[in-house]
Image (cartoon, grey):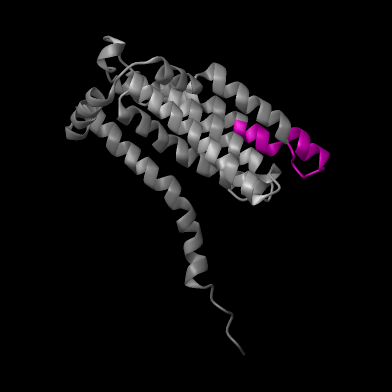
Amino acid sequence: MSRPARPSARRRLIPSARLLPIALPLITFLLIAWQVAVRGPLARADERVSGAVVDPDRVSGLLADLGNVAVAVPVLAVVLLLAARQARRARRDRWWLPPVAAAALMAAVPAVIVPLKTLIARPGPPVMGHETGFFPSGHTATAVIAYGAAALLLWPLSRTPFVRRAVVALCLLLNLAVAYGLIRHGYHWPLDVLGSWCLGVPALGALGLLLGRGDRLTH
C-alpha cells in the first residue's frame, strides 16, 4: 500500500511567505513608533534629515494635497463604482465584495490613525508650529489606501499586462508624490510618512488576499 504523498516544502512555505509582507511592515512600524515616542536616535536623525530637505514651495504643496481626503477618496469612489458595475455585468459571484471591502478599509483609516496620533502626540516640523499629533501621517495613510485599493480593484479589469503595470506604476507614483510633497513642504517628518506606509502596505496585502479568495483574483 503506497503512502500518501507529502506536500512539498515549497507548498508548506506558501502561507508563511504570504504573511511576511504583512508581518514585517507591522514590526517595522512598532520599532519606528517606539523611537518616535521616546525621541530615540532614529527620531533625532529623522529630524535632522527633515531640516536638511524642507523647502516649502507651491509644487510640494500641491503634491501633498493629493493625499487629502477631498482628492483621494473621490478617486477611489469612482473606481468602486466602475468595479461594481463591471463585476455585476459579468455576473460574478459576490460581485459586491471587492468594492465593499475596499470602502470598509478606507473608512477604517481614521479609526486607526487618529488614536495613534493622539497616543504618540509627536510635535510637527517647525513650519507647522507647536501642534502635536503628526505620527503617523494621515495624508499618507489616505493616499496609500485610496490609490492602493483602487489599483487592486482595477487589476482584474485590466486586460493586458501593460495596462496592469501602468496601474501599479501610477499608484506608486501618486504615493511617492504625496510623500515628497509632505516632507519637502515641511508638513510631516519623514518617519511620519514611513510609519503610515508600514501600516498601509499590510492593510492592502490583507485586502488583496481577501479579494483573491472572494473573487478569484490575485493580489
Per the picture, the main secondary structure of the magenta-coloured stretch is helix
Magenta span has 100? Answer: yes
Nearest the viewer among 92 and 169 is 169
Q: Quadrant of residue 192?
A: top left
Extent of the magenta region: 84-102
Nearest the viewer among 189 and 4 is 189
Q: Is residue 97 above or below residue 36?
A: below
On the image, the x and y values in percent for residue 112 come to 45, 27
Q: Is residue 184 above or below residue 206?
A: above
Quadrant of image for the N terminus: bottom right
Does residue 134 appear in the picture of this structure? no
| In the image: residue 133, left or right of residue 20 | left
On the image, the x and y values in percent for residue 216 come to 68, 51
| In the image: residue 102, left or right of residue 51 | right
Q: Which residue is found at the position 45% from the left and 29% from the top?
A: 177
Residue extending farthest bottom: 1
Q: Is residue 125 above or below residue 150?
A: above
Q: Which residue is found at the position 73% from the left and 34% from the top?
A: 84
Nearest the viewer among 1 and 98 is 98
| In the image: residue 194, left or right of residue 47 | right
